[in-house]
Amino acid sequence: MEVAGRAYAPYSKFLVGAVLVGKDGRIFAGCNVENISFGLTICAERNAVFAAVAAGCREFEKIVIVADTEVPASPCGACRQVLAEFDPDLEIVLANFRGQTEMFRLSQLLPRPTAGILDRS
């Protein structure tokens, strides 16, 4: 919840934080950073992934996503696709500020992540 409080969300007021756990035990935090041009906004999940990759970590155990919502919020499609690049079956823990949690595997939220125009297996 602490990293969600650092989110820069002056337009939506939608605070999201993510903590990505590397298989080597390192922890990478990310929060959403909005921009007045909404397409330039970066989600907390992608922020955490980019920090991990910049630090040399590319194998992940799980990601925990916390949002100030009534029910735990699921990652957007762009974040699902970025996460799938590294582990299509990543453990995802969703939580809200009220302490509710839900757990999924990325494969449940994004089946066939490599199907499409590139059609790679």
Image (spheres, helix red, strand yellow):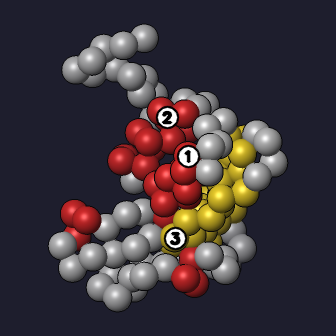
Q: Type of residue at label 3?
A: Cys
Q: Type of residue at label 1?
A: Val
Q: Is residue 56 left or right of residue 83?
A: right
Q: Position of residue 97 (x, y in %)?
A: 64, 79
Instruction: Name the image quarter holding residue 115.
Output: top left
In the rendered image, the quadrant that contains the C terminus is top left
- The first of marks 3 and 2 along the sequence is 3
Count of number-bearing discs: 3
Q: Are marks 1 and 2 in contact (CB under 8 Å)?
A: no
| Label 1 Cα crowd, 10 Å radius (few <14 / some 14-19 / many 20+) | few
Q: Is residue 109 left or right of residue 77?
A: right
Q: Type of residue at label 2?
A: Ala
Q: CA distance from mark 1 to mark 2?
A: 14 Å
Give the residue at x 67% y 80%.
Answer: 2
Q: CA distance from mark 3 to mark 2?
A: 19 Å
Question: What label sits on residue 53 in the rendered view?
Answer: 1
- Where does label 3 land, which residue? 31
- Where does label 2 land, which residue? 84
